[in-house]
Image (spheres, helix red, strand yellow):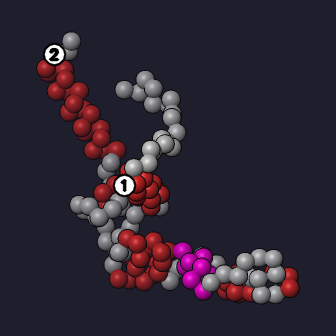
Amino acid sequence: MPDQTQQERYLSGLWSAMKQRSAGLATTVGPGIDTKSLTPAQHDRLWDERFLTIEQEHDLWRQGRTPETAGQPILSPEEIGMRVFQNREKLAKTGGRLEPSQWYDYISRMADRAERRRQGAEMPDTTPVSTETEGAY
């Protein structure tokens, strides 16, 4: 059994390694401490950033309304806007904060699990099992 000083050294080393790995993460994640807020100019630049050209947007407006695209679904103005200006939904959800896109998937999964718990249904474990971390400790 390791003595107290070895455990303390191990834990302090573990703590410093965790701090180094997460350096800068708090500035980009969630509504927590040290959340990085966007300036109004940055927010406006991201809000107006286009991901499709004018011609591609025009094709989306014509989709389903011409003989060539008759089999395709007709998109609503909101759907077209979200495809053309992809940052707008993210900015609206975060309230002007910078967050990684994986955060939304995680929050959706947690909300689904909470809803299933409220309904009393059994929760199947959908997380993939990985053996990559085996022996990493």
Q: Image check: 34 left or right of 63?
A: left
Q: Is residue 137 visible?
A: yes
Q: Which residues are magenta?
A: 77-86
Q: Which residue is mark 2?
A: 3
Q: Look at 76% across and 83% down and name the residue there.
A: 64
**What kind of secondary structure does the magenta stretch mostly adopt?**
helix
Say if the magenta span includes residue 27. no
Q: Is residue 126 above or below residue 48?
A: above
Q: Which residue is mark 1?
A: 118
Instruction: Please identify the residue farthest to the top as the structure is shown.
Output: 1
Q: Image check: 70 left or right of 26?
A: right
> As rendered, which of 16 and 99 lies closer to the eye?
99
Mark 2, Cα crowd under 10 Å, few <14 / some 14-19 / many 20+, is few
Q: Which mark is residue 107?
A: none
> As rendered, which of 29 and 69 lies closer to the eye?
69
| Quadrant in which the C terminus is drawn | top left
Q: Position of residue 116 (x, y in %)?
A: 42, 53
Q: Position of residue 100 (x, y in %)?
A: 43, 60
Distance of label 1 from label 2 (alpha carbons): 46 Å
Mark 1 residue type: Arg
